[in-house]
Image: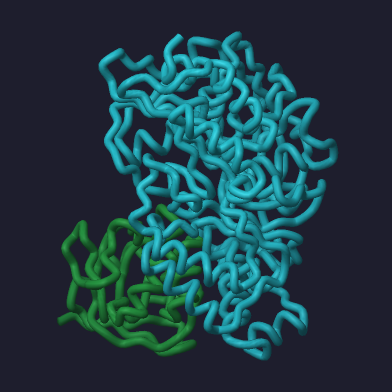
Chain colours: A green, B cyan
Amino acid sequence: MYVFRVSTVVVNGSCRGRAAVIDDYISFFGEVDPERGVHRVRGKRVADRVLVFRGSRGSTVGSYIIYSMKKNGKSPICFIVSRVDPVLVAGAVLAEIPLLVVEDFDSLISTVDDGDLVEYCSEGGVIRVYKT
Amino acid sequence: MDQVPEGTYTIMFLTREQEKILAGEYGWARSKALEVIVKVGEALGAERLIEVEHAHVSGISYTNIGDAGLELVQDFYRGRAYARVYTTLNPGCVDLLSYSQIVDNRYRDKQLILNRYLEAMGFRPTYTCIPYLHRKPGPGEHLSWGESSAVIFANSLFGSRTNREGGPLALSSAITGYTYYYGLHLLENRVVEVSIAVEAKNKCYGALGLWIGYNVKSIPMIRGVSNDISGLKLMLAASAASGDHGLIVIEGVTPAKSYIVSDKVEKMYVEDRDLEEYIGVEPSENDKVLGYIGCPHLDPREFFELVDKIRSRGKSAKRDRDLLVSIPAVYSNLFIDEIHELKRYGVDVAVGTCPIVSKLREKYDYLVTNSGKAAFYMSRLHGLNTYIASIDRVLEIVFGG
């Protein structure tokens, strides 16, 4: 088990699930299909996953896409990022998806792989990664 | 908007009233909307909220926001959200008069549903990117505006204060009457750090704006441009498209005390040859050309001048040449006679929309326009070659000399 300190809890909540890792910034508008919950560019499922990625970029329509994923039941269960921007924050708040900024993101992303179990307890201060 | 540097996250100070809104005492919609503003503000490092006088909501074109945006607007409406401040709306994706043969009205039904929700929440059916036509903001007044061309116009020409907001944030401000106190709301961030002398003889404001957006990263002061508001509007819109500018100080135009000049000001200048690559190359006789005027939307004086020019030419568009003019929604009542007159010359007038936020029915090879912003986006969205020219030259290309 690996432990990483959370530096900022932007949207709080507990979560526990399998990781989907994208070592890049994501433009939710264009790159993510809100009906299927898939990151089109990587062909990777993000629905019902703990999405570990650097942050969001691009169009402000991205906030609506995050909201739509949630309404469609195809959203990630948690966002774990290196940095936040207004598009991601607005989307996570509207969709009520936990959004956590990790202190040492580089070491997190070199540790966690797709399918690893990731958990965060509300106000717990750390995320835990269990390798599979 | 920019990524936020790590470690700037702050917990905002909220008044008791704001705490009550957040706690849901006034319902889900206002609580959710205020939470969006507070969390975005905290992520940027804002310490408190401020009241705004006017919200301008962008990102309401169904072509752009799709069912995702429609759902959120519908949920806010069903959650009894209502405009707390004067709120205007940006263009949608359909021509509200349904005359246009150029703008594709395929999403008409969806857009009209979206419009009904927005109007039922007390937002004004302006459908224009020039909200200052309906309400001119005062110097120092705090606004929460989306639509980058309107934001930069408000900051630079009226001395008002607004950041470049995205659709969801401006929508949240409309519902709550607040925004976060940050960025261009604070005088200390409205600091001129570069002075630009315009030495170009060709006053191609669209191209000049694109040059500024691409080449200038801090807040500039521009010297050597006239106080021709229509030209400045084109310049500002283009610079806000190719760059992330929200304020450009125009010497002799921008209200004093709405900005500060830094102790260290870098000097730059721009000449005719710097603008050439942004102006582009004229289309050939064989190209299928879309002429376009109305980005940003025309104010009444600009509209009448254009009608006069077209009337005095007295001709219809040449083969493989079309002219599209986009104007605010309110003109469909005020200027219906002029719109019909333009139609007789084969001019396609689209009301309450524009080709940047909609789809086009036909493919063109070339866009010829006076707007640098239109050239910037339409080369990207519709894959067109572009040529930026004066209105007279655009008309010559479309109607013949």
Q: Is residue B144 above or below residue B103?
A: below
Q: Residue at x 70, y 61 (%)?
A: B181
Image check: B136 left or right of A41? right
**Which residue is more in the foreground, B64 or B50?**
B64
Q: In the image, residue B90 lies at what x, y percent?
A: 56, 53
Residue B248 lies in quadrant: top right
Image check: B74 left or right of A65? right
Q: Quadrant of the C terminus of chain A?
A: bottom left
Q: In the image, residue B164 lies at what x, y percent?
A: 59, 51
Q: Residue at x 38, y 69 (%)?
A: B68
Residue B238 shows in this picture: no
Q: In the image, residue B319 lies at what x, y percent?
A: 32, 21
Q: In the image, residue B304 lies at what x, y percent?
A: 65, 30
Q: Residue at x 63, y 55 (%)?
A: B145
**Which residue is more in the foreground, A86 or B362?**
B362
Q: Is residue B284 above or below residue B76?
A: above
Residue B269 shows in this picture: yes
Image check: A10 left or right of A104? right
**Which residue is more in the foreground, A117 or B231?**
B231
**Which residue is more in the foreground, B218 or B84?**
B84
Residue extending farthest to the right is B257
Q: Is residue B156 above or below residue A71?
A: above
Q: Residue at x 59, y 75 (%)?
A: B33
Q: How many numbered badges does the structure rendering display?
A: 0
Q: Quadrant of the N terminus of chain A?
A: bottom left
